[in-house]
Image (tube, helix red, strand yellow):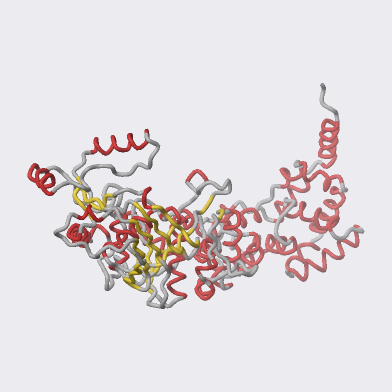
Amino acid sequence: MAATTLMGSPWLRIRLLPEVPLPLAPRLRPHLLRRRAFSALAASPDTAGPVRVRFAPSPTGNLHVGGARTALFNYLFARSKGGRFVLRIEDTDLERSTKKSEEAVLSDLAWLGLDWDEGPDVGGEFGPYRQSERNSLYKQYAEKLMESGAVYRCFCSNEELEQMKETAKQMQLPPVYMGKWATASDAEIQHELEKGTPYTYRFRVPKEGSLKINDLIRGEVSWNLDTLGDFVIMRSNGQPVYNFCVTVDDATMHISHVIRAEEHLPNTLRQALIYKALGFPMPSFAHVSLILAPDRSKLSKRHGATSVGQYKEMGYLPQAMVNYLALLGWGDGTENEFFTTDDLVEKFTINRVNKSGAVFDAVKLKWMNGQHLRALPSDVLIKSFEDRWKDAGILQDSESGFAKEAAELLKDGIDLITDADAALSNLLSYPLHATLSSDEAEPVVQDKLSEVASALISAYDSGELYEALAEGRDGWQKWVKNFGKSLKRKGKSLFMPLRVLLTGKLHGPDMGGSVVLIHKAGTCGAVAQQSGFVNLDERFRTLKEVDWESLLKVQEESSAESAVPASP
């Protein structure tokens, strides 16, 4: 017998072997026709149509970075195709779903800049956009499937179902439904209805055959139907099951492309069968790989922050989060890693999404945030830093321009706006004794640091250094050049000792800029008293109190002890 190709839409090709009359007549016993073998191929649309995608979070917790990336890929796909981005709330888990969680998810999406065209708060042509408000629609389509014979009432108790699972396990078979209600007589069904026995709606799955989909990311994916068994679409309490809701929602909202996490890939088989039974065209599917932790396990709370809200509170910029999330599994084929959202819309294509898992690297995210932070307009960046410094009690109102100079000096070492407080506090502090006592400072101390200190104290006491700093960077550069000549030092042998003696640290931003700013901090009135600032006068008083001879002796003793081999 020749194969028959049924073209329900250009999006779905179903081949049935052998030919079977369709649709099933309501008066016939549907189970007599269900043992046919068939092969189904769900293909991508052959013709271009309006692109409609959706992000459908469950309001049972915070927006995970994995969910945010899924939303982003949907958003970018829609915007790059001139399509619509739909937000649907899947709140059928009544016990765990909360209004607070829904509001948090919407807030996080808005913070990321992923504005939706249709949703629970903005409405749209295909609402309502909460599953809890669509129950009448699900019941309508469940009844349609009942009338066509695609589903049947199942009166099995929980005990009977558990026994079936145990039997299948003992026989080393998939845990498929083996109950009698798929083939029950009308009299048996009517008897249970009259008794008021609770029942579910089960979908009739063909005993043989396979389903194939051409996933836009993963390529061809196939399943054998004999591993599935008849599945429930409506519970005995009248609540619809997830896979049924999703299929009805996607179909009635005219979703053209379903872009979702790979953990939903197994659901595609059930959903494809429901699409076919209801006569709906199939969307294209694209299943995005999971986001992995550095140990390549699934990213979870034990690996640190995992929700968008947490990163927001930690001081991350939304544009940096969007940029980084986009690169978790996607790239434009170049070495470029810095993208604005507009750049991403222009360059995003689904065929460049990688099917292998992407590792979430918190260090790289922080680095990328620094790139976006420094890319902000100068006045925006300066004001952001200044506001934080004032809120932290480090700075007070001043027209001196100190905040601008501090921002310019420190910005390259700040990747998070929240790090700005520590960066300025560190600059204003003077931990000289702790630094001199450290092992890292030992080579600097032994390179005749005391001689440099003596010359530096003389330059300060004479007013020479103070006058140079009052002239700003130009004055500093002229002074330090002459100072180096007088000591016959240059390069690292000059600047490392000066950094330690003037800033009290071995590392930091540009030394000249740091010293000039420290001088300004002591004269401009911008630095608050409670900031912990140590001005130049106090620094030199501390410097004069250093007992260089004792310090060298301690270091020598320490070196001698470390050189003695341990006893066996």
Which residue is situated farthest in the top direction here? 568
Describe residue 135's horizontal placement relative to residue 459 as left or right.
left
Q: Nearer the viewer, residue 330 or 18?
A: 18
In the rendered view, would you say 558 is above or below 509? above
Residue at image point 43% right, 72% down: 78
Position of the N terminus, as image quadrant, is bottom left
Occupied quadrant, residue 417: bottom right
Placement of 197 over or under 489, stated as above or below: above
Task: Say above or below: 534 vs 178.
Answer: below
The image shows residue 108 at horizontal and vertical percentages of 41, 60
> In the drawing, does residue 30 fall left or right of residue 256?
left
Q: Relative to the observer, which residue lies in front, 392 or 305?
A: 305
Q: Taking 46 as reference, is 143 left or right?
A: left
Q: Position of residue 458 (x, y in %)?
A: 83, 55
Q: Whole-percent x and y of residue 154?
A: 20, 46
173 or 533: which is nearer to us? 173
User: Which image quarter holds the C terminus?
Assistant: top right
